[in-house]
Image (cartoon, grey):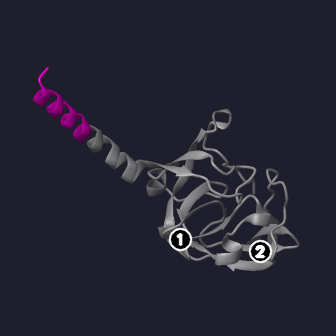
Amino acid sequence: MSQNSFWRDFLRFIIVAAIIIIPVRTWVAQPFLVKGASMEPTFEDGEYLIIDELTLNLRSPERGEVLVFRYPVDPSKFFIKRVIGLPGETIRIKDNKIFLVKGDKDEELREPFLREALTTPDGIFNLGEKEYFMLGDNRLFSHDSRKWGILNESLIVGRAFIRLWPPPRIDFLPGNFNYSL
């Protein structure tokens, strides 16, 4: 094999790989490294995830899904949190519990996966169109909607799709929780 043939084949390989990888990475899925303790015990610092970017272009996020999004205060940073409140809803935090306000009735959102149920400070959050209320699972150490406010849908990157690292914790749709209301 001549050297020209090697370089021509190598260049062809690079072009084909780029044609496949760039669109997938841009519109379908991307890697994400969990940093910090805000989502413990669901996600530990250093875990490696694949984020599904395509699904949320076809449907809206659901309560209980874990999303990666751009931090509203500094969009160059990425956060990972759980969807608690959906567009048009009112969320009330009172006495270390989370409630979905339905008319004159408050319905408690039970979260058995949490180590601590601490959700203070108390507050009421009215969500508008395309707005979400996001909380970390480690409520004592999570910088979330309680501190920086409501998340606009335009900042959502995608949902946690696959946990690839560490091997003993490999999981499909890791962290998703179905709140029964």
Closer to the N terminus: mark 1 or mark 2?
A: 2
Q: What range of the chain is rendered magenta?
A: 1-16
Local SS, label 2: strand
Of residues 30 and 111, the one drawn nearer to the viewer in this rendering: 30
Residue 107 falls in which quadrant of the image? Answer: bottom right
Task: Tell me where residue 180 appears, x and y as whole percent.
Answer: 75, 53
Of residues 154 and 60, the one drawn nearer to the viewer in this rendering: 154
Residue drawn at x 64%, y 77% as measured from the top left: 148
Eyeballing the image, is 25 above or below 81? above
Q: Which residue is mark 2?
A: 92
Task: Answer left or right for 131 relative to 10.
Answer: right
Residue drawn at x 81%, y 78% as measured from the top left: 122
Residue drawn at x 25%, y 39% as measured from the top left: 14
Task: Tell me where residue 29 appears, x and y as whole percent.
Answer: 45, 48
Is 151 in the magenta? no
Of residues 67 and 33, the one drawn nearer to the viewer in this rendering: 33
Q: Mark 1 packing: few (<14 Cα in 10 Å), some, or many (20+)?
A: some
Which amino acid is tagged 2?
Arg
Q: Mark 2 packing: few (<14 Cα in 10 Å), some, or many (20+)?
A: many
Main SS of the magenta segment?
helix
Which amino acid is tagged 1?
Lys
Name the quarter where the N terminus is drawn. top left
Task: Tell me where residue 70 appears, x and y as whole percent.
Answer: 52, 66
Residue 129 falls in which quadrant of the image? Answer: bottom right
Is 4 in the magenta? yes
Task: Answer left or right for 131 relative to 112.
Answer: left
Task: Answer left or right for 20 relative to 176.
Answer: left
Q: Which residue is mark 1?
A: 130
Residue drawn at x 30%, y 41% as measured from the top left: 20
